[in-house]
Image: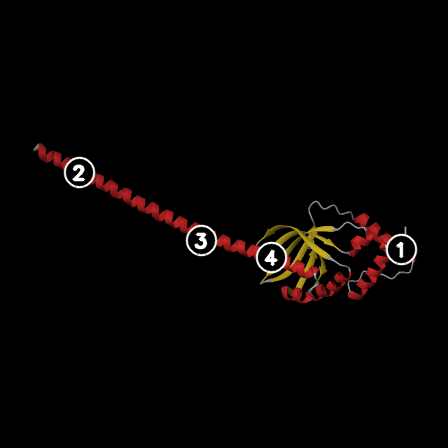
Amino acid sequence: MNLKYFFMLVFSALLITSCADKAKDDSKETQNAATASKNDAQKSTDATTAAKKDAVHIENVTFIKSFVEARNSYDAEKLRAITTEDYQEVFKNDFVEVNSQKEFLSNLEWAEELSAKTTIKEVISANDTTVVAIEKTTNYIDEALKRTPRNFKTTYFINDGKIVKQNFENAPGDKFDQKADDLLYGDFERFCEVRKIPFSWAPTKEEGKILRKALEQYANRQE
């Protein structure tokens, strides 16, 4: 074979191989670019979804804070608007302390007579349907009996823009002494019984007034 033609054939073969390799590289780069673009799009979608969830969570925390503010100002109309008719307050998922919205709003009048307040100390978590917070509750009973205010871990359950239920339990690390509390209540009740001072623990507005008066007499007693 003529060497000229031989070298031309070899050169052509090398050129074809080089072009094929380049085509493969270009195809791979195109695929990599498409994959990267797809990944970037997914990341963008995930970020948007996360941002929306965060916005809902923040909105729910704000919602619960507005509930606490309404409760502290004894705003029955607002509380009626943001709770369901079957609203409940349950201790440790076991003992139902408030069984309905009607009972909750009725108890609110008693709470006002006793200057009951709730303070959110910390929001632990929040998602689409729940907000978990550490709260401190106080009222005039604490002041009159020199009782230590209670701290609770409260879970608020939210559905369709309304609060369905509160589940609460003693806050982690909260040192609650039931025996000490019983002694404080016992001293107050004996004080009232000896002096024929009426008192009642019934959660109604009128009984709240009677209890408040008795507590004030006890708090102002001469030792």
Query: CB under 8 Å between callouts 4 and 2?
Result: no
For disc 4, the neighbor class at 10 Å (few under 14, some 14 to 19, many from 20) is few
Between 68 and 155, the residue placed more toward the observer is 68
Q: Which residue is mark 2?
A: 13
Amino acid type, mark 4: Thr
Q: Which mark is residue 45?
A: 3
Q: Which residue is mark 1?
A: 191
For disc 2, the neighbor class at 10 Å (few under 14, some 14 to 19, many from 20) is few
Amino acid type, mark 1: Phe
Amino acid type, mark 2: Ala
Instruction: Give the mark, 4 or 2, whose residue is nearer the N terminus.
Output: 2
Mark 3 or 2: the one toward you:
3
| Displayed quadrant of residue 97 | bottom right
Residue 130 in the image, given as x and y percentages of width and height: 60, 55
The residue at 60%/55% (across/down) is 61
Asked which secondary structure carries label 2, the reply is helix
Instruction: Give the mark, 3 or 4, whose residue is nearer the N terminus.
Output: 3
Instruction: Give the mark, 1 or 4, whose residue is nearer the N terminus.
Output: 4
